[in-house]
Image (cartoon, grey):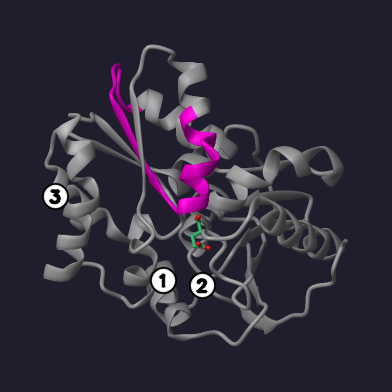
């Protein structure tokens, strides 16, 4: 049975990379809603309705477990949709928070994500619940997504934007920074450069795969990766395929989702 993974676009392939390391023998079906990306500036109702359509598609394809690789959909939709899905549905928040707690014995902690993820307060609330004493400084950093999609993973402009966004968190002397967006693992180099060695970066894609690995073992031979997109693949797919490793994608297919309203 395949593992279903979805994201608003191509960025969730960063999560697939971690999942393929954790579950090398699992087939993975990935849906990237490239026709409707970004989710990060949309309302909770819209993101929930899009997520419902994708979950229904993945269920029809036989997925027996699903990962919502998109942090925005994890923050806005996972909790409300989980009871009706019928198979385990993993979001990015619980594992990201657990990894932040494991990374440092003390706060303060910073969280960066899309405007919708930060406005939802999902990470802030989950962190406050687990570590009531910790100060959490959350910041929406929406310009980082287009920079990554353009392939501007380092260089003067990207570093300037990152520095501008992180300045207030650095002033608060954060110890840990949670990368609460699919795209941000691709910026780890510049984030580490700007923050310096005293701040630990929590990659929510790795954290999610690690937390799932603990509950699954002994599956078949070599897993395949099939990608389904709701629009034509743009140049960003090629860039992320490079990041995944040559020859890892078995097929890319265009699909039409069905409204579940
Ligand atoms: N995939 C989204 C996330 O992780 C980022 C891109 C978007 O805004 O849709 O929050």
In the image, what residue occupies the spot 24% across and 51% down?
165
Q: Earlier in the sequence, mark 1 or mark 3?
A: 3
Residue in the image at 21% along x and 40% along y = 168
Disc marking residue 69: none
Q: How far from the left and from the top, in percent, is residue 33?
A: 63, 71
Q: Could you tell me how far apart the alpha carbons at marks 3 and 2 are, in whole angstroms?
A: 32 Å
- Quadrant location of residue 114? bottom left
User: Depth-wise, is mark 1 or mark 3 nearer the camera?
Assistant: 3
Distance from the alpha carbon under mark 1 to that under mark 3: 27 Å
Magenta segment range?
Answer: 103-124
Q: Secondary structure at mark 2?
A: loop
Q: Residue 146 versus residue 2: which sits nearer the camera?
A: 146
- Residue 149 position, x and y percent, is 38, 74
Residue located beneath label 3 in the image: 194
| Position of 201 relative to 20 (above/below) | above
Residue under the point 54% across and 35% down: 122
114 with respect to 44 (left or right):
left
- Whether 1 is drawn above or below 204: the answer is below
Classify 170 as above or below 144: above
Is residue 106 located in the magenta-colored stretch of the structure?
A: yes
Q: Position of residue 118 (x, y in %)?
A: 46, 44
Is 192 included in the stretch rendered in magenta?
Answer: no
Q: Residues within 10 Å of mark 2 (few under 14, many from 20)?
A: some
Which residue has dot 1 on it? 245
Q: Is residue 155 visible?
A: no
Q: CA distance from mark 1 to mark 2?
A: 6 Å
Quadrant assignment for the N terminus = bottom right
Q: Which residue is mark 2?
A: 248
Q: How many marks?
A: 3
């Amino acid at each position: 049975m395949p593992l279903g993974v979805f994201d608003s676009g191509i960025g969730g392939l960063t999560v697939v990379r971690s999942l393929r390391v954790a579950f090398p023998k699992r087939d993975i079906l990935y849906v990237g809603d490239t026709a409707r990306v970004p989710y990060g500036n949309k309302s909770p109702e819209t993101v929930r309705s899009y997520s419902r359509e994708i979950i229904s598609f993945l269920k029809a394809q036989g997925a027996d477990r699903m990962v919502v690789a998109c942090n925005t959909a994890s923050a806005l939709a996972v909790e409300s949709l989980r009871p009706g899905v019928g198979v385990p549905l993993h979001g990015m928040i619980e594992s990201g928070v657990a990894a932040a707690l494991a990374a440092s014995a003390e706060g303060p902690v910073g969280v960066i994500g899309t405007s919708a993820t930060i406005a939802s307060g999902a990470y802030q609330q989950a962190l406050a619940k687990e570590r009531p004493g910790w100060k959490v400084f959350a910041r929406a950093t929406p310009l980082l997504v287009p920079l990554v999609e353009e392939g501007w993973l380092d260089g003067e402009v990207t570093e300037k934007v990152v520095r501008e966004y992180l300045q207030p968190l650095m002033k608060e002397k954060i110890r840990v920074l949670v990368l609460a967006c699919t795209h941000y693992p691709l910026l780890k180099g510049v984030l580490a450069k700007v923050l310096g060695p005293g701040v630990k970066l929590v990659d929510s894609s790795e954290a999610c795969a690690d937390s799932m690995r603990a509950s699954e073992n002994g599956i078949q031979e070599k897993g395949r990766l099939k990608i389904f997109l709701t629009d034509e693949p743009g140049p960003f797919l090629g860039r992320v395929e490079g990041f995944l490793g040559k020859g890892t994608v078995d097929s890319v297919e265009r699909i039409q989702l069905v409204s579940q309203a």
